[in-house]
Amino acid sequence: MRKISVLKIDKDCYVPRSWIMDWVRLIVLPVCKNFGTEATYVRMSKSRKGLHFYIGISKPIHADLANRIQYLLGDDCRRVDFNRARIKVHYSGWDKLFEEENTRIIQLYHARFLQEHNQNLEGGGGERVNG
């Protein structure tokens, strides 16, 4: 089975954008780092019941680990169970998110922005953003 370079999270609720950005900063970035990879971007789209998130990672990982990290990031529990069964039988399409046609995907975070922001502040006395 091929390695995964995009984590997919299904959250069946809507929350304020500030909560989502806290989730990215306090949960997504540290969890990815803990497993030896880095979140390079986070994108979001609306689903029928809530939100879908796409998290690009710097180092591709095996499906089992990807599903584990998705669980830790709050992926829908039923989806996690289905994905475990699909991975067990080596189903290559194990990590599906079903999007409505013409769904708009919004960029929430990009590692390059964080690096550029911090570089611009060096020597300028501004506050660094931790990622």
Image (cartoon, grey):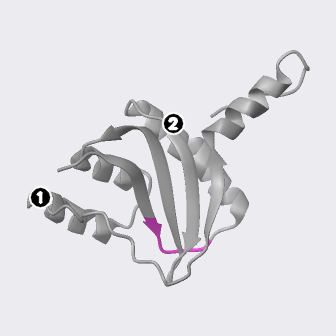
Residue at image point 77% right, 24% down: 119
- Above or below residue 42? Residue 97 is below
Residue 5's spot in the image, x, y percent?
38, 46
> Mark 1, residues whose alpha carbon is within 10 Å: few (<14), some, or many (≥20)?
few
Residue 12's spot in the image, x, y percent?
48, 74
Query: In this rendering, does residue 27 appear at all?
Result: no
Which residue occupies the extreme top position in the image?
Answer: 123
Q: Which residues are magenta?
A: 10-14
Asked whether disc 2 touches disc 1, contact meaning CB atoms under 8 Å apart, the reply is no
Residue 17's spot in the image, x, y percent?
70, 62
Which residue occupies the extreme left position in the image?
Answer: 89
Main secondary structure type of the part rendered in magenta: loop
When asked about the image quadrant of residue 3, the answer is top left
Residue at image point 49% right, 83% down: 100
The mark found on residue 30 in the picture is: 2
Which residue carries the number 1 mark?
Answer: 90
Query: In this rendering, does residue 79 appear at all?
Result: yes
Residue 12 forms part of the magenta stretch: yes
Residue 36 forms part of the magenta stretch: no
Find numbered disc 1 in the image and state the secondary structure of the residue it sits on. Answer: loop
